[in-house]
Amino acid sequence: MSSPPGRRARLSSSGTGRSSSEASEELRRRLLGLIEGNRVMIFSKSYCPHSTRVKELFSSLGVQFKVLELDQVDDGASVQEMLSEITNQRTVPNIFVNKVHVGGCDRTFQAHQSGLLQKLLQEDSAYDYDLIVIGGGSGGLACAQEAATLGKKVMVLDFVVPSPQGTSWGLGGTCVNVGCVPKKLMHQAALLGQALNDSRKFGWECSQQVKHNWEAMTEAIQNHIGSLNWGHRLSLREKSVVYINAYGKFVEHHKIRATNRRGQETCHTAAKFVIATGERPRYLGIPGDKEYCITSDDLFSLPYCPGKTLVVGASYVALECAGFLSGLGLDVTVMVRSILLRGFDQEMAERVGSYMEQHGVKFLRKFIPVTVQQLEKGSPGKLKVVAKSTEGPETIEGIYNTVLLAIGRDSCTRKMGLEKIGVKVNEKSGKIPVNDVEQTNVPYIYAVGDILEGKLELAPVAIQAGRLLARRLFGGRLEKCDYINVPTTVFTPLEYGCCGLSEEKAIEMYKKEHLEVYHTLFWPLEWTVAGRDNNTCYAKIICNKFDNNAGGLRPLLPSLSSSVMPWHYQR
Ligand code: FAD
Ligand code: NAP
């Protein structure tokens, strides 16, 4: 029922002697109390015609609602401020239905027209679950487990569509199965090879000839991944999260169809949904690519040593895989369409590349493959690759045992019925735009992780976003995921860790003359006795002169020791 007009009230209690943070915490709790305690909550201004239209709409539907007129309470301005923090919307009316933030007048009328409002008005108890998470990777699992810890009834759907080579895996998503974890372990295997060489200088006498066994490494890594898959299943069970190994597709508002690998279907409803379906490797779309090439989805469980390998692509995945394959002793060539590590500081990217080149990786720059043809079957077989220059008519060909495509990843958003419920997807990229509380344009649908438009594709970011989202949805918390200045590492043979802006981006944003760049070459102590390159490890700090020389650190280093790293160079 609407509040009686004309009475001037104060929403927050007027206690004295409290700090402003305590007062704002109390106000936040009271607002969340109103949102949670009322089926329809309208924050309004009594003279606002849009607010009046919305109230008339709910009255015409015979739905009772609670109104807080911000112009009729003493602390209306603070309420408006807090609402903008909670919802990212400053304007009135600001409407919640069954704890879901619908938005303002236009969005409420759109929701009414599409039938969504009527669905939202159903009580939460009308649904099977409080939350269904689609995708059991980094973001999805973090969100599901946090929501369950907060007492909610949660389901997770996870399904791996096999790669064109037939590879599939267990629960945990990309990072655990075909990303960070096996990548880092294979990188470690390569570093150990280097350490074996170094060890002789440190007095270790190895009489046997040392060689690497791909099958033994892969089996050990896959066993470890199997234990992580099991750990995730156990952890969901302990938190009473229902897990189904099935592919999720929306069939109507609040309803999803789950299809398992035997084609059996079940339908499930929830008050809220989180989409966390991640990405899968892209293919070139040239003759022979899906038949004969592999991607990172296949590499980490490849049952045989890949042999002489062509890696196509020049970003994170490409350079990391090329780096460890070469470190394991394989003949590796990287085919680069344009530049190395687009988006990263180009001076650092070139240093990463030149170290790889000096240590045996070949680079074919400004070429793209046009056909891949099988010459011989086998494990591995033999493939002929024809490539053309991006700068002229020149073509080249080469024979490889394995061609690894690492040319980017496509979002898994196109085959899950999002059009049925009106979730906006960027047509070109397949990414889902969300506001700063990870809410899509359909109020009860949220999204986290790699599928988000304009956000970082990193496992810890997906985890943090998923966890904070659950806390905001079910734990009365406000903290949002901060996507700015997230540190990252590229695990190439010479590791590259960075945080903040690349030099190119800093120049674009602040102008060259406003920047001071400090840099240094250094020789890590561990490399000295080992007799490794002494003019290779490099660090730089890019500072804004007008911001007290604040800056970001962009070091290129296997281990950073301040005692051997004087910052005495300046340019
Ligand atoms: P994912 O982990 O991809 O999980 C999505 C899950 O949803 C998958 O299991 C998928 O099969 C499932 N799914 C998809 N559609 C449906 C559907 N309709 N129904 C049911 N289930 C569905 N990040 C780092 O931070 N550090 C690293 O070192 C690093 N290394 C990487 C190395 C490689 C080779 C790759 C490819 C990635 C790497 N990443 C790294 C990135 C990291 O893996 C991702 O950022 C992270 O896994 C994204 O998590 P997510 O929850 O968005 O999706
Ligand atoms: P990406 O960053 O999108 O890079 C794609 C690469 O492939 C680029 O070098 C691109 O070249 C090239 N390419 C694209 N289309 C091509 C074509 N048709 N022919 C030849 N080359 C082509 O993709 P990614 O390396 O797969 O990484 C995806 C995401 O995973 C990253 O954004 C990252 O966040 C995450 N990741 C993180 C880590 C880590 O934290 N260590 C490791 C791996 C992945 P151009 O530059 O010419 O476009």
Image (cartoon, helix red, strand yellow):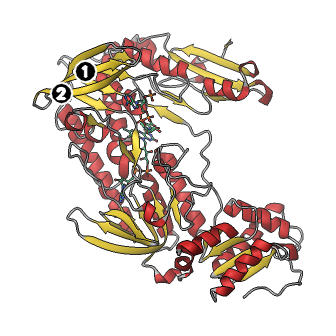
Image point 10% across, 31% down: which residue?
378
- Decide if residue 217 is on the left or right side of residue 60: left
Which picture quadrant has residue 485?
top right
Front one among 161 and 222: 161
The residue beneath circle 2 is 373
Q: Secondary structure beneath disc 1?
A: strand
Label 2 beta carbon within 8 A of ligand 2 = no
Q: CA distance from mark 2 to mark 1?
A: 8 Å
Which picture quadrant has residue 21?
bottom right
Label 1 beta carbon within 8 A of ligand 2 = no
Outermost left residue: 377
Image point 12% across, 32% down: which residue?
379
**Residue 567, image x, y percentages:** 65, 17
Q: Which mark is residue 386?
A: 1
Q: Is residue 14 visible?
A: no
Q: Which mark is residue 58?
A: none
Residue type at tag 2? Gln
- Decide if residue 472 is on the left or right side of residue 50: left
Quadrant holding the N terminus: bottom right
Quadrant holding the C terminus: top right
Q: Is residue 341 visible?
A: yes
Figure check: 177 above or below 314: below
Image point 38% across, 12% down: which residue?
358
